[in-house]
Amino acid sequence: VKLAADAGAVLCRGGKAAVGMLRRLAGGGVPRIAAPVDQALGRAGESRSTLLTPREGLRFALQKANFRQAAMFAQSIIIAEPDNPQANFALGMDYFLSRDYARAEPFLKHCLEHRPDDPAVLNNLAVVYLRLYRFQEAEKYAQAALSRLPNSPEIQRTLAAIRKAASGK
């Protein structure tokens, strides 16, 4: 999984979301629902009576890189706010991690409409297109990600994988 930690930071593996990027995507203003904090944070055995709004739950789940939980909160947000970049990111990443690349694509592309210079989203889209054997699009997005974060070894590996797959080697 490729996610940008913050501007100028190196991308990391293993589904660890970047707190800086996620904080930039965070927002508020959705009615409260009964979602315990421990559920949002994915902590078993802890019980708290604090309720979270869907946005709060989404933000906390994304900060913990819990994309499955984030997607659950994002489902309620996306109905009311189809353009919400944080919800689109969460759903796209959930499908991405589930290797359902065809379903991840529209959510990540929608997120990119609001964050066109985000190297994490650009690189994830490059990987999506690589997995869908759409090598020209994959290279286009990887190059765009690399132009925004030129020293990223993760993006460089993505680009090398695309070129290798496109050449048939």
Image (spheres, rainbow, N blue to C red):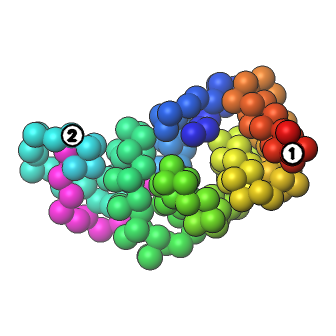
Residue 7 shows in the view: yes
Describe residue 55's horizontal placement relative to residue 150 as left or right.
left
Where residue 83 is drawn, which disc sits there? none
Describe residue 8's horizontal placement relative to residue 81 as left or right.
right
Looking at the rendered structure, the kind of residue marked 2 is: Arg
Q: Residue at x 58, y 29 (%)?
A: 12
Residue 25, placed above or below residue 17? below
Would you name the residue on which mark 1 appears? 168
**Few, some or many residues within 10 Å of mark 1 (<14, 14–19, 20+):** few
List x then y, in percent, for residue 36.
17, 52
Would you name the residue on which mark 2 appears? 43
Helix, strand or loop at label 2? It is loop
- Name the foreground residue: 79 vs 129: 129
Residue 110, placed above or below residue 160? below
Alpha carbon separation for disc pair 1 and 2: 44 Å
Magenta range is 27-38
Q: Quadrant of residue 156?
A: top right
Which one is earlier in the sequence, the residue at label 1 or at label 2? Answer: 2
List x then y, in percent, for residue 16.
48, 34
List x then y, in percent, for residue 111.
62, 58
Q: Main secondary structure of the magenta part?
A: loop
Q: Quadrant of residue 44?
A: top left
Residue projecting furthest to the front: 169
- Name the foreground residue: 22 vs 103: 103
Q: Residue at x 38, y 53 (%)?
A: 68
